Amino acid sequence: MNKQRVFIFIGNSGCGKGTQAALLREKMEEKQMDIVRLELGGEFRDFWKKSGYTAERSADLAESGALQPEFLAIHIWSHMLIDFFSGEKHLVADGVPRRIREAKVLDGALKFYGIESPTIIFLDIDRSVAKERMLSRGRQDDDEDAIEERLNWFDKEVLKTIEYLKEDEYYNVLTIDANRGIEEIHEDIMSQTNI
């Protein structure tokens, strides 16, 4: 059996995390690797469709542009691991973790599953490029004020989490220049991950 591989994509909004995670999964699937896909944004969108007080409050937070609480993010991704992860599967995660406390919980989960040297793929993008990409998407929630708020939040919270992960020898942290085109970024990731 091949060693389990874990790839965690992290980076600012507009850096292409979802696109690059999907491209990596395609290559892994071509090699018959069984994968658990964890895309936190999509999981939250599914969660908001449910009825119930917590789902409604979470959806209201999202609509206002506010940040989701850590406990809810952890609840969602930990249930995915519990329900779908096994000793034979590989993991490709996107959007997890975003804050240091969440990173500590993820660290405990990965060690519980016996994962050795998980790879963090930090898609490093200039703020101006990230803003331009988000504006060009034309999403309803991507007005200039909301984008600035997300970019500021990344600088304040997520960058600290990335530094925290870089300082931990347990992780293999790859910093990828995400200011380039999709294919060039993908080729860089493939060359550094040995898939």
Image: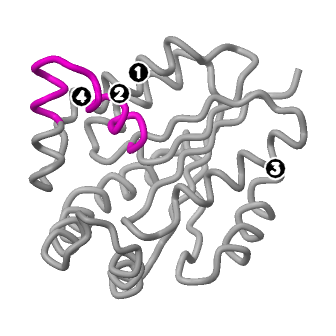
| Mark 1 Cα shell of 10 Å, populated few (<14), some (14-19), many (≥20) | some
Q: Are marks 2 and 3 in contact (CB under 8 Å)?
A: no
* Mark number displayed over residue 105: 2
The mark that comes first in sequence, 2 or 3, is: 3
Circle 3 crowding by C-alpha within 10 Å: few under 14, some 14–19, many from 20: few
Give how far apart the Cα atoms at labels 2 and 3 are.
29 Å
- Is mark 2 in CB contact (under 8 Å) with mark 4? no
Of circles 1 and 3, the one toward us is 3
Give the residues in magenta: 41-58
- Residue 15 placement (x, y as % from top left): 47, 69
Give the labeled residue for mark 1: 78
Using residue 19 as the reference point, say whether residue 105 is left or right of it: left
Amino acid at pointer 1: Ser
Are discs 2 and 1 less than 8 Å apart at CB?
Answer: yes
Instruction: Give the mark, 1 or 4, whose residue is nearer the N terminus.
Output: 4
Question: Label 2 vs label 1: CA separation?
Answer: 9 Å
Name the mark nearer the viewer: 2 or 3: 3
Q: Secondary structure at mark 1?
A: helix
- In the rendered image, residue 112, in percent from the top left (x then y), is placed at 52, 15
Q: Residues within 10 Å of mark 2 (few under 14, many from 20)?
A: few
Above or below 166: residue 133: below
- State which quadrant residue 41 falls in: top left
Measuring 86% from the left and 27% from the top, which residue is drawn there? 2
Badge 1 vs badge 4, beta-carbon distance below 8 Å:
no
Spatial CA span between label 1 and label 3 = 25 Å
**Disc 3, SS:** helix
The residue wearing badge 4 is 72
Q: Residue at x 71, y 35 (%)?
A: 5
Which residue corresponds to mark 3?
27
